[in-house]
Image (spheres, rainbow, N blue to C red):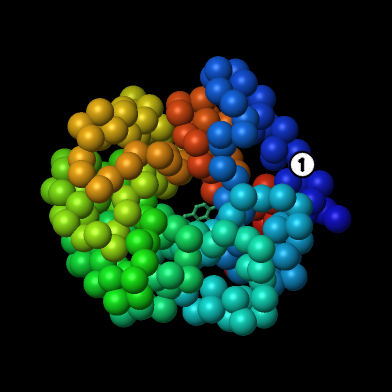
């Protein structure tokens, strides 16, 4: 049961990082990033006690869903979302973490309204201001939050980021701290129809630092499932 053992080790590291920063380990949500992993592996992760499964590709997610991979699991969409795929995932996913445009907000809002549901979403922030990377720039956040507040079917629950890879950071920026500051600022502003419950950041090679900076949701793939074979 390699996956269950890995989850146990990751949980221990999460707990230590939470306690070091004065928080309750139970408040940190562990999302297993399952791209390119089989339905069988996903079921092992669910049995091993992760809080949610994260998927990056709609097609792959729908296939694994048909194979029963997500029974008894919460499902998060964490990959780049194309507008023509929105209708297939609204309602299926408990959370869409990667919302980064007014167009997506509008499409999710309309689809959720037609299903009579409220879709949980996170707004993805391009905190490293990287060209060709998903996410909104931080100065665009107020605009997108106000727009989202106008769609009763869209429930913004927090922020998500994939900061520049650690090996590529050659500036003085601490992206995790910058994300936490944005999160706290927005929470203090109390936008209508918007909650700042979740700050999703930190992957296999960075979750300890992310939790130290205030993350309460981490997305972990290879440390749970092993390396991906591309
Ligand atoms: C793959 C992926 C992860 C997890 O990456 P690992 O380095 O394998 O832990 C987290 N977030 C997103 C958006 C991903 O695509």
Is any atom of residue 171 visible in this view?
A: no
How many numbered circles does the render carry? 1
Name which quarter of the figure residue 207 lies in: top right
* Residue ranking furthest to the right: 1
Left or right of 64: which side holds 159? Answer: left
Q: Which of the pair 150/63 is nearer the observer?
A: 150
SS for callout 1: helix
Q: Which of the pair 110/84 is nearer the observer?
A: 110
Q: Which residue is mark 1?
A: 8
For the point 66% across and 25% down, which residue is it? 16
Residue 13 location (% of width, % of height): 68, 32
Quarter of the N terminus within the rendering = bottom right
For the point 36% across and 51% down, which residue is it? 122
Considering only vertical position in the picture, is 80 above or below 200? below
Quarter of the C terminus within the rendering = bottom right
Considering only vertical position in the picture, is 145 above or below 153? above
For the point 43% across and 41% down, which residue is it? 198
Is any atom of residue 150 visible in this view?
A: yes
Considering only vertical position in the picture, is 108 above or below 133? below
Residue 218 location (% of width, % of height): 53, 43
Q: Badge 1: few (under 14), some or many (20 or more) residues near its Cα, within 10 Å?
A: some
For the point 66% across and 63% down, which residue is it? 72
Residue 100 location (% of width, % of height): 28, 57
Residue 92 location (% of width, % of height): 48, 71
Left or right of 48: which side holds 102? Answer: left
């Amino acid at each position: 049961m390699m996956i269950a053992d890995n989850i146990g080790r990751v949980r221990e590291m999460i707990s230590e990082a939470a306690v070091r920063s004065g928080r309750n380990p139970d408040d940190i949500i562990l999302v297993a990033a399952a791209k390119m992993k089989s339905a069988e592996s996903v079921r092992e992760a669910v049995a091993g006690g992760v809080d949610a499964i994260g998927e990056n590709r709609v097609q792959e997610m729908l296939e694994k869903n048909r194979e029963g991979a997500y029974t008894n699991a919460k499902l998060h969409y964490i990959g780049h979302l194309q507008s023509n795929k929105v209708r297939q995932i609204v309602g299926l996913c408990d959370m869409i973490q990667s919302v980064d445009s007014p167009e997506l907000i509008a499409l999710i809002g309309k689809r959720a309204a037609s299903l009579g549901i409220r879709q949980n979403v996170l707004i993805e922030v391009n905190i490293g201001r990287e060209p060709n990377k998903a996410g909104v720039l931080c100065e665009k956040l107020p605009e997108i939050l106000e727009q989202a507040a106008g769609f009763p079917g869209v429930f913004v629950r927090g922020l998500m980021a994939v900061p520049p890879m650690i090996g590529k950071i050659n500036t003085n920026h601490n992206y995790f701290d910058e994300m936490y500051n944005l999160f706290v600022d927005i929470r203090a502003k109390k936008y209508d129809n918007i909650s700042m419950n979740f700050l999703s950041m930190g992957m296999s090679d960075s979750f300890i630092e992310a939790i130290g900076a205030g993350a309460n949701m981490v997305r972990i793939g290879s440390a749970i499932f092993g390396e991906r074979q591309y």
